[in-house]
Amino acid sequence: MPALPLRWRRAWPTALLGVGALAVGAVLLRFNPNAAGNPLPACPFHAVTGLYCPGCGSTRALHALVHGDVATALAMNPLLVISLPLLAWMALDAAGLRLPGATRMRAVIGNPKLWLVALCSYWLARNLPWPPFNWLAPGGFPGL
């Protein structure tokens, strides 16, 4: 049996990622992470330390997004909401789709050092107890 063309082999991981995203969206349409007794797990890092990790509030943010509530999603995890379009762009680029500005964007958002610095800075900032830093905590943005 002949091997799949390179284009198809590059597209498979992105297709699987898309199917996974649809599955997560279906689960989040069905279950509310804010409701008591929901089957979705809480953050183990927060449960043990009382500190917020960069992912804290992600489940609630994604739940809000699949229900069309962008403001609540931003209040739960602003970094996730801002990063989702960039991550989608990276997945499409990895699948071999040539998007406008691909070379420049790949150099910026494909840099692991950028993501490491952003995640560590966000992790530290969202645990500081003063405004505006405490607004980065899940649900910490005033007025939401």
Image (tube, rainbow, N blue to C red):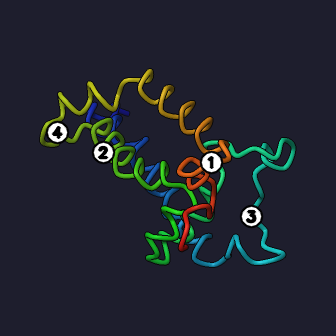
Between residues 39 and 133, which one lies in front from this camera angle?
133
Circle 1 sits in a helix, a strand or a loop, which is it?
Answer: loop
User: Which numbered disc covers residue 89?
Assistant: 2
Where, by quadrant of the figure, is residue 122 drawn?
A: top right
Numbered disc in front, either 1 or 4: 1
Numbered disc in front, either 4 or 3: 3
User: Which numbered disc covers residue 40?
Assistant: 3
What is the quadrant of the C terminus in the image?
bottom right
| Point 56% across, 55% down: residue | 135
- Vertical order, 27 against 127 (above or below): below
Give yes or no for contact between labels 1 and 4 (Cβ–Cβ under 8 Å): no
Numbered disc in front, either 4 or 2: 2
**Residue at the outermost right position:** 48
Earlier-in-chain disc, 4 versus 3: 3
Residue topped by disc 1: 130
User: Which numbered disc covers residue 50?
Assistant: none
User: Which numbered disc covers residue 98?
Assistant: 4
Q: Amino acid at mark 4?
A: Arg
Circle 4 sits in a helix, a strand or a loop, which is it?
Answer: loop
| Point 35% across, 28% down: residue | 110
Side (left or right) of 65 relative to 42: left
Q: Amino acid at mark 2?
A: Trp
**Residue at the outermost top position:** 113
Numbered disc in front, either 2 or 1: 1
Circle 3 sits in a helix, a strand or a loop, which is it?
Answer: loop
Q: Amino acid at mark 3?
A: Leu
Q: Position of residue 28 (x, y in %)?
A: 60, 71
CA distance separating discs 2 and 1: 34 Å
